[in-house]
Structure formats: structure tokens, C-alpha cells
Amino acid sequence: LHPRRGVIVAAGAVCACVKMIAPSTLVLGPMIGILLESVLIELACLPFGARAGSAVVGGALATTWSLSQKVLTQIVLFGAPVLSWYIELLARAEAWLKLPKTGGLWVVVPFVAFVALVGAVMANVGLRAGRIAAARKNAPPEGSRE
């Protein structure tokens, strides 16, 4: 609706501030996540503007960031042993799914790809919804003689 540089980050900052007033004690992590996701989407839109390709890349980046943020936060809070726990968990998932032993790649790559695909599709849906809203905003009122 407002194709200007920085508007996505500004919207993300507003959403992060709204999260601050949520009746919860855990708001810093989600606030950081919301803000960084908006930065990633803005970066994806910088080269070509609000186009379908930029939306797809931005949506994929934003959704995969949420996965990365969880792991990075746990590493910061609990240290490097968290990585070995995740690797063990992935190895067990491979065994349970009867997949070849690859250190978890057969589990992680499809999961991350699925999450990125969902983000890309939803970003494209959001872009289309914005375009429809912009077209309605610019259309003459019903019943006018234009």
C-alpha cells in the first residue's frame, strides 16, 4: 500500500512495540524476532521493490529466521552442548523414519525447505492482498459516474 523504502522495517518496529504490551513475561525474544524478520523482508525488497520475487525471497527468509533464532537463542542461553543435543535428536529422527544416516540432513533440509515454502507462499498471498487493497483504495466509489 505504501511502496517506500523502510516502511516494512517501520511496520515491524510497530509490531514489536505492540508485542511489548502483551500480557506476558517473555517479550524480548519475540520482539527481536519480529524486528529482524521485517529487516530481512526489507532487504529482500531493496533491489527490486515490492515484486513477487522479492516477496517470495523475503517470506522464505523471515520464516527460516524464526527457526534459526530459536536455535541461536538456546545456544546463547545454554551453551554449545545444545548443538550436540540437536544432532542427537536429528539422528534419532533419521533412525525412526528409516532414513540414511547423514547427521540429520535428511530431516533438517526438507523441514527447512517446507518452512521456507510456506513463508514464500504466504508472502506472495500478502503481496496480492496488498495489491487488491491498493486497487480498491484507488477505485472510484460505487455509484459514481466516472
Image (spheres, rainbow, N blue to C red):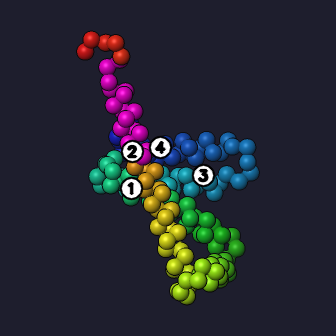
- Which is in the foreground here, disc 2 or disc 4? 2
Query: In the depicted view, which residue is nearer to us: 64 or 69?
Result: 64
> If you read the primary sequence from the N terminus, does the residue marked by circle 3 or circle 2 appear first?
3
Task: Kindly identify which residue carries mark 1.
Answer: 56
Mark 3 burial class by Cα count in 10 Å: few <14, some 14-19, many 20+:
many
Name the kind of residue labelled 2 in the image.
Leu
Tell how many labels.
Answer: 4
What quarter of the picture does the C terminus occupy? top left
Query: In the depicted view, which residue is nearer to us: 67 or 13?
Result: 67
User: What residue do we see at 43% from left, 50% from top?
Assistant: 123
Coordinates of residue 107 in the picture (x, y in percent): 55, 76
Name the kind of residue labelled 4 in the image.
Ala
Q: Is residue 94 left or right of residue 50?
A: right
Identify the disc placed on residue 31: 3
- Which is in the foreground here, disc 1 or disc 4? 1
Task: State which region is magenta.
Answer: 125-141
Q: Secondary structure at mark 3?
A: helix
User: What residue do we see at 27% from left, 11% from top?
Assistant: 145
Task: Kindly identify which residue carries mark 4.
Answer: 10
Mark 1 burial class by Cα count in 10 Å: few <14, some 14-19, many 20+:
many
Name the kind of residue labelled 1 in the image.
Val
Separation of residues labelled 1 and 4 (CA atoms): 20 Å
Q: Secondary structure at mark 4?
A: helix
Contact (Cβ within 8 Å) of mark 3 with mark 2: no
Q: Secondary structure at mark 1?
A: helix
Using the rendered image of the protein, determine whether residue 130 is visible from the camera's viewpoint: yes
Mark 4 burial class by Cα count in 10 Å: few <14, some 14-19, many 20+:
some
